[in-house]
Image: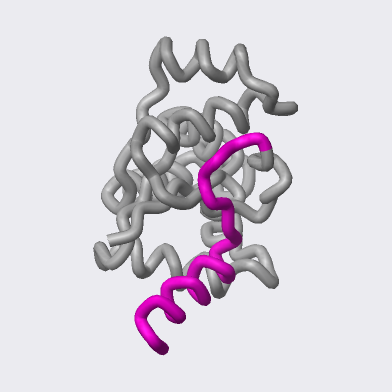
Amino acid sequence: MKSVFCDLNFLLDIFLKREPFYHSSAHLFGKIENREVKGYLCALSFPTLFYLLSKELGREKAMKTLEKIRLVFKVAEVDERIIDLSLASDFKDFEDAVQYYSAVQAKAEVIITRDKDDYRKGNLQVLTSEEFLAFISRQMGF
């Protein structure tokens, strides 16, 4: 089973129904929810998601959304090692470095994001949700 680490924009595209990204992201979310793909989120994503979603949806709906997300995704840790690696990295954006090293520690195979350039400094495969869906379709012969 493939394991993916999802960036915040992936979830925001779904829960804020941002077009034209909503459909491919929602489709991949369904695969993670059905356990066809193992999904990870960085522990730091939860407070950031709450902040962004509550501005758009209100506090109660944001909390319910986070509860659903937590049932679907495994939480990738952020610890001293990840912070130290992020501080010493060449990543332009510190948050992206934390996300990247959190994905590495979780042993994710792919990072799912629309901002692929943010992860150029890393060695993990970086795909959009649409690219990942095409990739797994090719692997399965569809």
Residue 133 belongs to the span the image colors magenta: yes
Q: Position of residue 38 (x, y in %)?
A: 31, 55
Image quadrant of residue 66? top left
Q: Is residue 141 magenta?
A: yes
Q: Position of residue 85 (x, y in %)?
A: 52, 17
Eyeballing the image, is 18 above or below 124? below
Vertical relation: 55 (above or below) 23: above
Q: Quadrant of the C terminus?
A: bottom left
The residue under the point 54% across, 26% down is 98
Residue 16 placement: quadrant: bottom right
> What residue is rendered at 60% in x and 40% in y?
52
Q: Residue at x 41, y 49 (%)?
A: 109
Taking the image as shown, residue 140 lies to the left or right of residue 46, namely left
Q: What percent of the width, then of the height, locates residue 122?
A: 59, 37
Q: Which residues are magenta?
A: 121-142
Q: Is residue 105 above or below residue 19?
A: above
Residue 122 lies left or right of residue 59; in this view the side is right
- Please report the residue visible at 56 percent of the width from the left and 74 percent of the height from the top: 23
Q: Seen in the image, is 39 located left or right of residue 20?
A: left
Q: Quadrant of the N terminus?
A: bottom left
